[in-house]
Structures are given as C-alpha cells and as structure tokens.
Image (cartoon, rainbow, N blue to C red):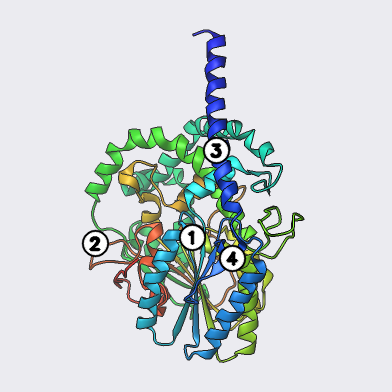
Amino acid sequence: MSRLNVIKKLTVAFAIVGCVMWVHHASAQTALTVPPHQLRTKVDDDDHRVIIDSDGVSAEAEQIGRQLREMFGHVGRQHLHRIVVFIHGGLVTLASANDTATKQRKIIMDDDKTAYPIFVNWEAGFPSSYERHLLYERNGISYRGTPAVWSALVVTPLVLLSDLGKGVANHGMNTVLNFGKVLENNDGLYASRQRTFVTKNKFLETLRCFSSNPAATQADDNFFHDGLCHRADRKPTINLYLGHDITHIDYPGTALGSVTVPLQIITEPMLDGFGTPSWKNMVRRTRSMFFPAGNFITVSGQSDQTELHTGAAYQFFEQLDQFLKTHPDYYLDLIGHSMGTIVINEALRNFPNLRIRNLVYMGAACSIRDFLVAGGAYLKAHPETDFYSLSLHPRKEIDETNVYGVPVRGSLLTWIDEFFQTPESFLDRTFGSFENAVIAYRLLPQTHRIHLKAFGVNGRKGLAGPQKHGDFNAFRFWEYDYWSTDVPIDQTYQPVVR
C-alpha cells in the first residue's frame, strides 16, 4: 500500500470521527439548554440522596443550596439521630447509584431504627468519563458548553490516537509487571524465590510485628493462612485484622486465569489506553464537585457571563457541618467506598472541624499520602473519632477477575497501582490495599482508634465478606460488626440487596 493511500485512509477516518464528534456535541449542546431546574445536580425528593452530575454543579447552585437547607431542616425534625453518609466509588453511573440507594435506604432504616442514611451520588460511569476526556476536557479546562468548544473537538481524533498509542507503547512493560504481580499468589513459587518478591517480603516482615509469636511466623511462611487478630492493648498500638486464607488450590480460578491469558494480553492496551484517562477524569470529578472552576457552562436563561460557584459536594458538607454544630445530639458516621474516599479526603481538607463519630474507608482508592494529609491530620486533631479501613484479602486483591477473566487480573486498586496512576513513590500507592496499608502503618496515628481490616477468603465456613472490589456495599456496610476488628477470624457476613 502506497504512502498516499495510507494518508488518504487516515484522513477519511479522522473526518468520520470528527463528524461523529460534532453530531454528539450538537446533542450535548441541546442538553445544556434545558431550564436550570431540570439539571441533574440536586437533592432528591426523598431527602436521602444528593445527586451530583458530571459537572459537579451548574447554574442551579442557589437552588441546590435551598434544597440542602430543606433537607437538613427535615433531618432536624425527625427522631433518627444517627446520620449515615455514604459516598460510592468510581465506575458507577448515576442511574445505578440512585437505584442502589433506593433499595439500601429502606434496608438501612429497617435494620437500624436510629439511622438516617444520606447517599451522595455522583456521575462516575466509564462512558461519561471517557467521553468528557475525549471531547471536551483539555489541561484542566472543560470546553463543554463554551463558544470555544470547537478548539477541543478539533483535536479529538488526536486524543484518541494518543490514548491508543500509549496503550500499545506500554503493552510489554505492563504485561510483564502485571503477571509478575499475579505470581506473588503462587505460594510454591514464592517459597522458592522469596527474594524476587520484595513487596510481599516487606508486607510479611511488617505483619510479623503484629503477631504474638514472631518467631513462629519467621519459621513458617504459611503462618498467616489462618488469619491474624491484633488488639491495640499492646504494641503496635493500632488494631489489625486479617481474615483466613485459602486452604486448597482454587482449581476453577486457576483454570480460568490460564485459559484467558491470551485475551488478557490482547486487551491490556485497551485497559491502559482507555482506562487511564477515564480514571483521571473521575479523579477530576472528585475535585470539581467541590470547586468546579474550569467547568465554564452557560445555561439558557442565565447571563452569558460565567459565574463560578462552590460545587454541590462543598455545599453539602458545609450544610452538614453547620447542622452538626447546631444539633449536638446528632452524630455522623461517614462511609466512603473506593473513590468515595477521595471525596471524603477533599471534604476533610475543607471542613477540618466536621464532627465525625466513625470514619470508614472501604477499599480506599485514595493514595496513602492523600490519606495522611487529610484523614491522618483529621484523626490527630479529633481524638473522639474512630477510623476503620476495610480491605480485600491480599490474595483476592491480586486474583480478582472480571468479565469472565478477559481483562488482566487484579482489583481496581491493583489496576490503579500498576496502570492508571504510576505512583512516583510508595506513599502514592492506594491506601485501600491491605498490603500497602500494613507496610505504611508506622506513618498512621499510633492509637487504638485506628482499625485496619482485611476480610478473609470464602470457602471455610461460608461468606467471609467482600471478595471483589465492588462487593463492599453488597454487605451491611453501616453496621459496626462489619467494620470491627474485634470479631472471630472465621466471622461470616450475609450480603444484602444491591
């Protein structure tokens, strides 16, 4: 094929992509011209859901402020004094989050007659995240709904080409690193090549500090297969719980992982090429829902001159903070899953005096550093607050499979550490990985109020808790026993409707 023909075909392909983008943009512009009261950033009519769209806030900022005041007025007039705020993670669409909240609100209120649940639902779906990255958002600025939107759309084909190119260029490196990580779960290989797996070595070395018999753990690499429960009444002065490991080879899982290896290798560039920018766009949203500077949207019926407002999440936590200050007999349990913990960290930075009884992170996608700066500083300043970090068992963190084993193995946190985030230092790795949290435990506030918990692996006496990253809120995440490190190693948990 001649170079001229190649150039012609690329030109046609770019033209087609450009036309599709323009059509999509036209429909998006139509959506932007709806009256402000119809936009999706709002408090739901049932006063249990704060719904935040992709922009974090638009010209209805004053309206959502009024809605929040009415919501907390309602909260103050009822007898349920335990406020349970739950913030979901990434890869969740608004429709899915709202549906889950509707089901779980009733379950929570039936289960705990003192609880008033509030769900902070934000648009975190993969399609909308990648779409915004591809079409509108450039270097921290969203051109969606602005006269200069053409300048973002014109480079859309180049953005797509860049994403694909990065995925292909990183293919070899990512494949080797990923399969190297998976090999850590091969106990026989680890026993014969311990020096090769430095992270696991450091994890086990640190874990021995929590054992009542360090000498036994040193002599037996499988010592922790039966789990570990450490109370803070002796050093180290934090609580730690590690559920039991498997007692046999997972033949179905091993077979699935082996059969799908070619598919894992083939799809890895797409996971990196499309997943990385989508992840970064979701991170953007965890920040723009507090301060949406850079989302310059003009809505019909409003002045052409753009006004920047505080985001819906900022207004929610501001009203929550004020409510708790004026209602001392109410208390707050603040729970975040995955990227919801990044939202909580942002809230703690902006409202460092927010009165929290229990702070619960489930599969935290925030970095260790982000937690230390926000959550760690908060806990040092608030001795009345208990903190719980819930994680998957380290084996399940690495072995998680999705879509019948087609993508590379590992939970979302593994993907973040290995693909999406490329940590510059160890403290930039995810805090919700039990392995990471244990290694970094000395940097946490050394107090009995800190609880690190990894659920066990299913198979001994029933369901040992979440087995995948998305499973945490499939159980009774609002109950103390679910967070507690003071439970039997073989504790079982029953899932609820999601």
**x and y, in percent, of residue 372 in the image:** 62, 65
Separation of residues labelled 4 and 3 (CA atoms):
26 Å
Indicate which disc residue 89 carries: 1
Separation of residues labelled 3 and 2 (CA atoms):
52 Å
SS at badge 2: loop
**x and y, in percent, of residue 488 in the image:** 32, 75
> Type of residue at label 2?
Gly
- Please say whether residue 422 is visible from this viewpoint: no
The residue that disc 3 covers is 23
> Type of residue at label 3?
Val
The residue that disc 2 covers is 459
Q: Are the residues tagged 4 and 3 within 8 Å (C-beta)?
A: no
Please name which of the two marks, 1 or 2, marks the residue nearer to the observer. Answer: 1
Q: Between disc 1 and disc 2, whose residue precedes?
A: 1
For this rendering, which residue is in front, 35 or 183? 35
- Please say whether residue 461 is visible from this viewpoint: yes
**x and y, in percent, of residue 46 in the image:** 47, 76
Q: Are the residues tagged 3 and 2 within 8 Å (C-beta)?
A: no
**x and y, in percent, of residue 17 in the image:** 53, 31
Q: Residue furthest right?
A: 305
SS at badge 1: loop
